[in-house]
Image: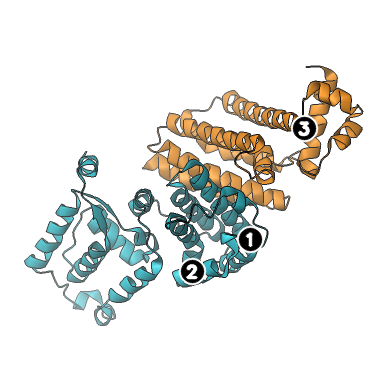
Chain colours: A cyan, B orange
Amino acid sequence: MDILNTPWLIKMLEKSSQTPHGRLLNLFDVLEDWLDAPHINVQISAQLLAKSKTKILQDFLTIEADKAGAAIPEMLANQLYFMAVAAMQEKLEANNHKSLSHAKYAAKALIAAQTKKDFHISKSLAYSIAASFLGVIIISGSWLLLRESIKPTTLAQTSLPASVVAAPLASPEQTAALMAELERMRHGNCQLIEAIQLPDNLKGIYLNMIVNGQVSTDPHEQKIAMELLKKTRCNYTPMLMANSTG
Amino acid sequence: MSLLREKILSTATSLFQTQGINSTGVDNIVAVAGTTKMTLYKYFRTKEALILEVLEKNQQDFQNWLNEKLISNSLKPAEKIQQLFDYIEEWINSPTFIGVAFIKASAEFPNEENPIHQLSSQQSREFRQFIGKLAGEAGIKDPDGLALQLSLLFEGAVQAEQMQRGSGAIKYAKKAAKILIDGAIKS
């Protein structure tokens, strides 16, 4: 089966993100998810991957790379394609469960290099690599639902000068609930794969409040943090607990 | 090594890289090398044995060249990994670059049971381990992870370059590698 050149893969990528940047990166998640599905490994081999002759995927990636503002879209598409193939071969041949996550991380840097977008080395990306090792894969369709549910609600306030709007404070109960949830999370190994795709404002809240534990008193930010926490998956097995508290 | 053996080896290296391994017959090699099949088989038992030796020599030559670059420039550990893609870029952009043997061989012999594929995979792993060693010496927390990221960038750029000579793929791979290395050093 020529997995890399199927209409199925293209459809999965098309619906995986609203941005070309996201669709390019999600290639690695979709392929990893597919390889992790039951009974798939027996149908595919590195040999079959290497025999791929058609260019449906490379053509798709070229279009997306162009939309993403790549300096040389076709070249970026080719590089991403070969990186994905090499990572899949590594997973299949060497049973390296982290290969596609690392490929995605490298791809993010490569896209940044070609599009001059900022590349943030963040704990959230490290999270995604750890998560893939545990076989936790989330297609970003679920993330779209989350994003819809946490749209900023302070639009009216932000249209006014900050000096005439008193900043509201979160209630002590709301703050305590968030702190308790964060404290509980520290005793486990937690991942939020979708953090990679968060818009910068949400990523900032995620990193400051959830990763670094710096809880803001802004009720809106706390609400967003709680929503993100609900989507964060944690493993509290004793071994991982020991690692996370070391 | 006898001069004739060396001639056969260098001829085979050049033909494999430019025409492809499967497309290059033994007849072609002996014709270009100016020798006979009998002589070729005296030194190399089979075509497969010749291919394996070509792969080993190519990788050894590349690794020696890279080691020499890293040593002769008296670089500190962190500088070595930071300079790695500069040297790779220099190598890929040189007029004599005709591809990376183990990457080409792996594509031409995709069967995992094939000794040529196995050697290609081993060389790919060894190159990654080499990067991992540099990363470890530079004090990077996850040297194996960074090595995998950099080796994937390397393979992606080389294959793009093999598709289209002068593509400039390595230039962007180098930029990406810098982003990854700088991030790994800081973390």
Residue at x 27%, y 64% (from the top left corner): A231
Write down the residue under mark 2.
A12
Q: Label 1: state its secondary structure.
A: loop
Q: Quadrant of residue A124?
A: bottom left
- Whether labels 3 and 2 belong to a single chain: the reply is no
Write down the residue under mark 3.
B47
Identify the mark nearer the N-term, 2 or 1. 2
- Whether labels 3 and 1 belong to a single chain: the reply is no
Q: Quadrant of residue B91?
A: top right
- Whether labels 2 and 1 belong to a single chain: the reply is yes
Write down the residue under mark 1.
A72
For marks 3 and 2, give the CA distance: 44 Å
Instruction: State the residue lying farthest toward the left.
Output: A172
Label drawn at residue A98: none
Residue at x 54%, y 36% (from the top left corner): B125
Screen quadrant of the C terminus of chain B: top left
